[in-house]
Image (cartoon, rainbow, N blue to C red):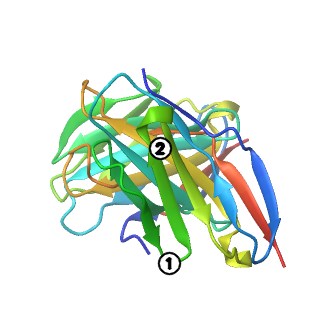
Amino acid sequence: DSGVTQTPKHLITATGQRVTLRCSPRSGDLSVYWYQQSLDQGLQFLIQYYNGEERAKGNILERFSAQQFPDLHSELNLSSLELGDSALYFCASSASGQTYNEQFFGPGTRLTVL
Amino acid sequence: AQKVTQAQTEISVVEKEDVTLDCVYETRDTTYYLFWYKQPPSGELVFLIRRNSFDEQNEISGRYSWNFQKSTSSFNFTITASQVVDSAVYFCALRVESGSARQLTFGSGTQLTVLP
């Protein structure tokens, strides 16, 4: 158990809908990262937050957004969902935003868009 | 841009065999960090090891060992006396010091199956 929690574990929804994925980092970790894992794209970095502020952006679509709250939990919002958004979404946390920090991953949220 | 290549898509071995998973990386940065993660069938990503670009010492942890060679830009992972529980997808990843986006760049993963 990495100490990172994600809810829900599974999510099934329809095209055009909007969903929110939630992540709680390990106790004491200030940085949160979101990743998408799909069969065709592999594991891709989406976005990073550090202590409430956006730190880095990867291949995140404009239909997706995220935020980190004062209690350090984070939410990833996915809107106008398409079939291709079906994937496993991971949240990871690290002690700081430093490059050398290992990231600890949550169990993931499996999103299925029908 | 950074790139990680794991050329072995799938490997199958019989229990107790040794197996090496290859990882080749590309970066122009002189300061970088390499990682290995394990993804068992249950789906979570488990951190295994971190290595920085200035430390080329090989590392051994139980049945696991890692061979880092800057000359060939490789960071290979060997499992000695493999066990069925080692069956998983293994990812090699790279993170560089420079740039505004210091994200993890993952390889495509190697699916290891250990047969009893």
Provide residue A57's location: percent of width, then percent of height: 34, 29
Residue receiving disc 1 = B62
Provide residue A51's location: percent of width, then percent of height: 15, 48
Residue receiving disc 2 = B93
The answer to which quarter of the image holds residue B14 is bottom right
Give me the chain letter of mark 1.
Answer: B
The one nearer the camera, B100 or B51, is: B51
Residue at mark 2 shares a chain with residue at mark 1: yes
Q: Is residue A22 left or right of residue A72?
A: right
Observer able to see residue A19: no
Quadrant assignment for the N terminus of chain A:
bottom left
Residue density around tag 1, few if under 14, some if 14–19, many if 20 or more, within 10 Å: few
Residue density around tag 2, few if under 14, some if 14–19, many if 20 or more, within 10 Å: many
Q: Amino acid at mark 2?
A: Ala
Of the two numbered discs 2 and 1 on the same chain, state the one appearing first in sequence. 1
The one nearer the camera, B3 or A104, is: B3
Which element is circle 2 on? strand
Q: Residue at x 30, y 49 (%)?
A: B55
Provide residue A108's location: percent of width, then percent of height: 52, 58
Q: Are marks 2 and 1 in contact (CB under 8 Å)?
A: no
Q: Is residue A37 left or right of residue A59?
A: right
Q: Is residue B44 above or below residue A59?
A: below
Q: Residue at x 18, y 65 (%)?
A: A28
Give me the chain letter of mark 2.
Answer: B
Q: Residue at x 68, y 66 (%)?
A: B41
Which element is circle 1 on? loop
Observer able to see residue B116: yes
Provide residue A3's location: percent of width, then percent of height: 36, 71
Q: Is residue B53 above or below residue B40?
A: above
Q: Amino acid at mark 1?
A: Gly
Instruction: Tell me how far mark 2 sits from mark 1, CA to CA.
Output: 21 Å
